[in-house]
């Protein structure tokens, strides 16, 4: 069973170890730089990228503004097409609904299409507790599942693994879960892919229940859309008798026409492809074709609260392309696990503390896991101003005054007074300059000692600028 | 044309040479510069750490200090980004939360008049050759706020390219963040240092004598790391290069 994020340390502590793991850093650096360069090329091909980005932003904002109406419209359309809609307010409720639906079929196995929503609610673990085995069928998810690991990237969950590590995982674990890896498996990509293909095919053909998420839900027709690259999704969506889709409520779009925008921006932003290889769409049930039973579980799990926050709600525009992860200098060094959530990187740093709240030390540390360099905002295909939301969330954390913030607040208040009294500031500057011979290069104490662990403090000048000005220009 | 220098708190207290260089440079170009002593800090460190309300008095102070000047010029991209991007937000929120219109008025008065030094030189004074002389090998790091929030683009490079004697060498991975990020450097020291180390590796690979930037906070972080490593390179603010001439070379 794949591990969970419960009980993770705060971001700086988790990152401390990741930064020192040279293999991890090399894997991450190589993978993120390759994809970010390709993405830049794929995006530059479209002359109307800026307009598409703006259109995506507007469609999402308009939909979020009238979310209640579109969700009701969606429910009606899904029901009319022969599907059943379930509403889940949190993870526990969603897991219970899915477990009951699977049990009602009499099955003890399900095949899964890669889905962030089911990871968010820990569905695999919940099903396991009910005696149901969930098999991941996306290649990278399979690697993570077999390796009893946690995903560290939205799109490439095994981004932190190299080929040699994957070969070892396949060779030792596949037999535990089904068809074993062939003898003498090497780390050649084609051989690894073939081993996975054979292992998975057996499961596709046996499965009676499929579980998926969705990239989009079209309100006007009740159609769900999954965008993927390997074809495993298509298998899971068409072969089983029962299909259960767990989807966040923010994934609805009003019309088919709206897909036109996202089916251009999503693949280019995520995999740097002009078009993704498989786009599967399904509407309710159809006689003698595909699943005969279809259930849609609409997941809230903190989304309504996020929607209530005027600045923070833009995070719900996210189409999970992961472009922001691939350009983020912090993600590149710290790795996905440090974010302690299925949503790592810049989007994770703003989404997780909104969905889960900031009570835990980890969640409260996430808004600070950024240098505010702005690279994420530049690439985001729905123009989420991630730095703006980060600072907004920092304000909330600082206001609540968790560990460390009481002292900080006092210091900021004191500084604010000095900065509003130029004479006091000038006196302080003068004092610092006069005593400069006494200043050490390294400092003790929280904050200062961390600063000087890897850097020298700047030398203080002989006089502050305002004194130079007084002597020379007045 | 009444031009005020906004030196910034960091330059005033720690890097006065940058502010002095800015004054000398602008005066050489025929601009009369004033330094209103009522100025202190734009509030960026406080704001970015989550203390928005604590920055409101500083927004008002900035507006008062620079009242009546046609242009406010500062050798710090991130401080201009603070004014341009965040002052209007602070103003709107102060209004929405019922604390009056003063911050919003301060923002709308300051935003159109506040310039980063290279913007002022290229866009307002319309010069790229400022008559500087600096016979050294230099590489340029475009700080994130100047690059992405202000969109300074080619302005700093065009100014550097016109400097007599200067050999400008390309910095690999130039657009990547140096890892400073204000309190980020303190709150996430390991990641910050890792980012800084990668930036320096790239910078040292150019063989440049000077790593030039237009934001002393990033340079303070990188310079501190260079000194710790005893590396054969120094950081230098763009203004100090542009102020250097054959008659009065950089000290
Ligand atoms: S925040 Fe934007 S860039 Fe990041 S995953 Fe979501 S849509 Fe993509």
Image: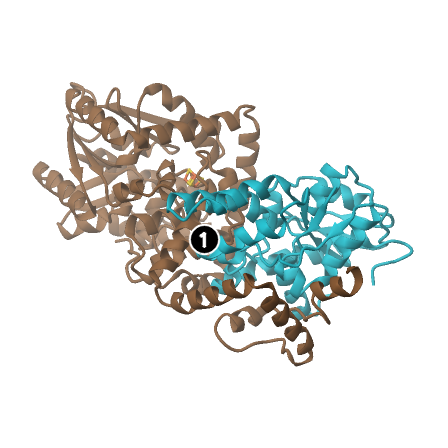
Chain colours: A brown, B cyan
Q: Depth check: B92 or A100 in front?
A: B92
Q: For label 1, count other residues whose C-alpha is less than 10 Å away and answer few (under 14), some (14-19) or many (20+).
A: few
Q: Dot 1 corresponds to which residue? A: A164
Is label 1 in a helix, a strand or a loop?
A: helix
Q: Residue furthest right?
A: B247
Could you tell whether A137 is left or right of B129 in the image? left
Q: Depth check: A385 or B172 in front?
A: A385
Q: Depth check: A232 or B216 in front?
A: B216
Compared with B195, B224 (above or below) is: below
Q: How many marks?
A: 1
Q: Quadrant of ligand 1?
A: top left
Whether residue A216 is visible to the viewer of this picture, yes or no, is no
Could you tell whether A175 is left or right of A420 in the image? left
Whether residue B25 is visible to the viewer of this picture, yes or no, is yes
Compared with B201, A261 (above or below) is: above
Q: Position of residue A403 (x, y in %)?
A: 36, 67
Compared with A58, B78 (above or below) is: below
Asked which quadrant contains residue A280, the reply is top left
């Amino acid at each position: 069973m794949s591990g969970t994020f419960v009980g993770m340390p705060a971001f700086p502590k988790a990152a401390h170890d990741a930064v020192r793991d040279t293999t991890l850093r090399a894997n991450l650096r190589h993978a993120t730089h390759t994809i970010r360069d390709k993405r830049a090329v794929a995006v530059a091909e479209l002359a109307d990228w800026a307009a598409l980005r703006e259109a995506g932003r507007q469609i999402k904002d308009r939909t979020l503004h009238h979310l209640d109406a579109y969700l009701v419209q969606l429910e009606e359309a899904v029901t009319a097409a022969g599907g059943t809609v379930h509403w889940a307010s949190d993870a526990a409720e969603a897991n219970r609904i899915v477990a009951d639906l699977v049990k009602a079929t009499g099955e003890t196995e399900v095949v899964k299409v890669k889905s962030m929503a089911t990871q968010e609610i820990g569905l695999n673990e919940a099903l396991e507790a009910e005696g149901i085995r969930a098999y991941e069928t996306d290649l990278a998810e399979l690697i993570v599942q077999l390796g009893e690991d946690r995903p560290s990237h939205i799109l490439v969950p095994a981004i932190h693994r190299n080929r040699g590590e994957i070969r070892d995982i396949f060779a030792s674990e596949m037999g535990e879960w089904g068809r074993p890896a062939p003898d003498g498996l090497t780390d050649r990509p084609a051989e690894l892919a073939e081993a996975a293909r054979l292992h998975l095919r057996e499961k596709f053909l046996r499965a009676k229940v499929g579980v998926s998420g969705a990239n989009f839900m079209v309100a006007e027709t009740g159609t769900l859309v999954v965008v993927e690259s390997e074809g495993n999704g298509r298998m899971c969506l068409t072969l089983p008798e029962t299909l259960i889709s767990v989807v966040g409520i923010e994934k609805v779009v009003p019309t088919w026409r709206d897909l036109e925008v996202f089916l251009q921006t999503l693949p280019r932003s995520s995999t740097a492809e002009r078009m993704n290889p498989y786009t599967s769409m399904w509407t309710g049930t159809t006689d003698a074709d595909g699943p005969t039973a279809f259930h849609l579980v609409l997941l809230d799990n903190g989304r309504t609260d996020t929607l209530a926050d005027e600045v923070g709600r833009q995070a719900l525009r996210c189409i999970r392309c992961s472009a922001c992860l691939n350009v983020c200098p912090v993600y590149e060094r710290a790795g996905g696990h440090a974010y302690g959530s299925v949503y790592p990187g810049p989007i994770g740093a703003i989404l997780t503390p909104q969905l889960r709240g900031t009570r835990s030390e980890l969640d409260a540390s996430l808004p600070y896991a950024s240098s505010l360099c702005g690279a994420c905002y530049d690439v985001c295909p729905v123009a989420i101003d991630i730095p703006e939301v980060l600072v907004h969330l920092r304000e909330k954390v600082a206001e609540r005054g968790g560990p460390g913030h009481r002292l900080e607040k006092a210091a900021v208040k004191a500084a604010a007074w000095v900065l509003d009294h130029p004479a006091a500031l000038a006196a302080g500057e003068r004092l610092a300059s006069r005593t400069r011979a006494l200043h050490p290069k390294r400092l003790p104490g929280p904050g200062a000692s961390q600063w000087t662990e890897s850097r020298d403090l700047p030398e203080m000048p002989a006089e502050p600028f305002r004194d130079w000005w007084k002597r020379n220009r007045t | 044309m009444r031009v005020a220098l906004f030196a910034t708190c960091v330059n005033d207290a720690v890097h006065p040479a940058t502010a002095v260089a800015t004054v000398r440079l602008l005066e050489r170009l025929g601009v009369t510069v004033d330094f209103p002593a009522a100025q202190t800090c734009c509030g960026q460190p406080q704001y970015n750490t989550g203390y928005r309300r604590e920055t409101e008095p500083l927004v008002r102070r900035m507006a008062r200090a620079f009242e009546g000047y046609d242009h406010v010029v500062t050798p710090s991209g991130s401080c201009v980004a603070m004014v341009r991007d965040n002052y209007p937000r602070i103003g709107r929120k102060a209004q929405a939360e019922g604390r009056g219109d003063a911050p919003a008025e301060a923002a709308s008065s300051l935003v159109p008049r506040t310039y980063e030094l290279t913007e002022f030189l290229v866009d307002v004074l319309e010069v790229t050759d400022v008559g500087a002389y600096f016979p050294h090998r230099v590489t340029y790091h475009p700080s994130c706020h100047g690059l992405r929030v202000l969109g300074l683009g080619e302005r700093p490079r065009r100014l550097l390219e016109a400097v007599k004697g200067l050999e400008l060498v390309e910095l690999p991975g130039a657009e990547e963040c140096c890892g400073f990020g204000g309190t980020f450097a303190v709150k996430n020291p390991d990641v910050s240092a890792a980012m800084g180390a990668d930036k320096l590796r790239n910078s040292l690979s150019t063989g440049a004598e000077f790593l030039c930037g237009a934001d002393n906070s990033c340079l303070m972080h990188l310079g501190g790391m260079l000194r710790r490593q005893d590396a054969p390179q120094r950081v230098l603010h763009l203004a100090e290069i542009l102020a250097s001439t054959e008659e009065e070379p950089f000290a």
